[in-house]
Structures are given as structure tokens and as C-alpha cells.
Amino acid sequence: MTELMSHRDVRIDVGELGEAVMGPQRQQLTVAVHSGLAPIRTLSSGTVRMAGGHHALPHIHAESEIQVYVVRGKIASLVGPDLTPILHGPGSLLYIAPGTEHAGVNLDPYEPADLVEFRTDPAFNADVVRTPGLDALAENRVTELRREYLLGRCDAQLAIPSVHAVTR
């Protein structure tokens, strides 16, 4: 981090995107703005890259709200204790309340997906709790969704940006 400018109670620090790391939910995460860069109390951001054919492991963010913006890709979110699928194409936004079970799925077997996430976790990924009891159900949902995607049955929903809020 380097200080770019300091003038009249305003300080601008410049950081760099770190190296992508694999989170416990099996997502490739690059932290952007976090408590190591600024005195953040509640909001952090970063990017998520999902390789073609990849899906995250089911998890919750124990205390954090998250918002996801789909930049590129054909995504499904599996949400809640039944891992109900929701489809998202580019331009879509998703809100997930704290403690809500979820997993992201890249439906395309070849093309990567790029997402931007905003979280109320100052460190960006500190309150992730895996929910391994949902792994088998997630695998079943992923298999079903990929079959539907390859048959073209998801195309209409993925073509229109959507906004979803998942709350408890």
C-alpha cells in the first residue's frame, strides 16, 4: 500500500489486487478493498473467478451480508437448506443474508465466470463456514442444472439480467 495523496483530512491509499487465493468454499478469490488497506468497519469487496465447469462448496457467511454482481458468465446460485437454484446472467445482482446456505455454480463447462462481491465482512472472507452436510445435495443439484443448461432450457432466464434477494 502506498499513500497517493494527503490533503486536508483526506488520505488516498493505493493498494494492489492481491494474488488470487482458494477460499474454504472452493472459490478463487481476489480481495480488493479490505481492512488491511483502509480502516474498514463493515464493507469489503473483491472478485471471484469460477473456471468453466466449476462450483463452490456449500457454505454460509456467519455474520456477513453479501451482494454479488455477475460481470461475465452463466451462473446458478444454490440457496437455502434445500439448495434451491436461481439463475443469473451478466448484469445480474444477488443479495444473500447472513447465515444463508449457498453455493455458486458456473453452468458453462468451458468459459470462466467473473463476479464482483461486496461483503459486510471487513476481511472479505473471514466468516465463511462450510456446510459439508449439503455436499451430496449440491452435487445432485449441479448435475441437474448442467443437464438443463446443455439442453438449452436455461437460456431465456440467463439472457435477462435479474435481481434476487435471499433472506431468512
Image: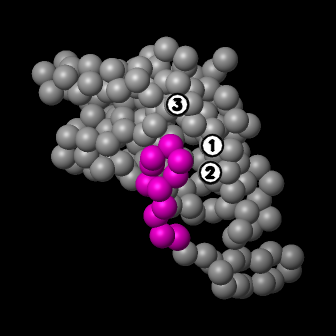
Mark toward the start of the polypeptide (3 vs 2) = 2
| Residue found 73% across the figure and 37% down from its top | 63
Q: Which residue is mark 1?
A: 128
Disc 1 and disc 3: Cα gap in Å? 12 Å
Q: Nearer the viewer, residue 98 or 71?
A: 98
Residue lying farthest left? 151
Q: CA distance from mark 3 to mark 2?
A: 18 Å
In the current view of this chain or complex, which residue is farthest to the top? 82
Residue 90, image quadrant: top left
Question: Could you tell me the amino acid type at mark 1?
Answer: Val
2, above or below 138, in the image:
below
Q: Residue at x 55, y 75 (%)?
A: 16
The residue wearing badge 3 is: 132
**Rendered location of residue 162, percent (x, y):** 42, 28
Residue 156: x and y, percent?
24, 22
- SS of the residue under disc 1: strand
Dot in front, 1 or 3:
3
Q: Is residue 18 above or below residue 115?
A: below
Look at the image and give the residue range highlighted in magenta.
Answer: 17-28
Q: Give the residue pinned by disc 2.
A: 125
- Please name the residue shown 63% across and 62% down the image: 33
Looking at the image, residue 158 sits to the left or right of residue 58; the answer is left
Is disc 2 in contact with disc 1, using a CB cutoff of under 8 Å?
Answer: yes
> How many other residues sit within 10 Å of disc 1, few (<14), some (14-19) or many (≥20)?
some
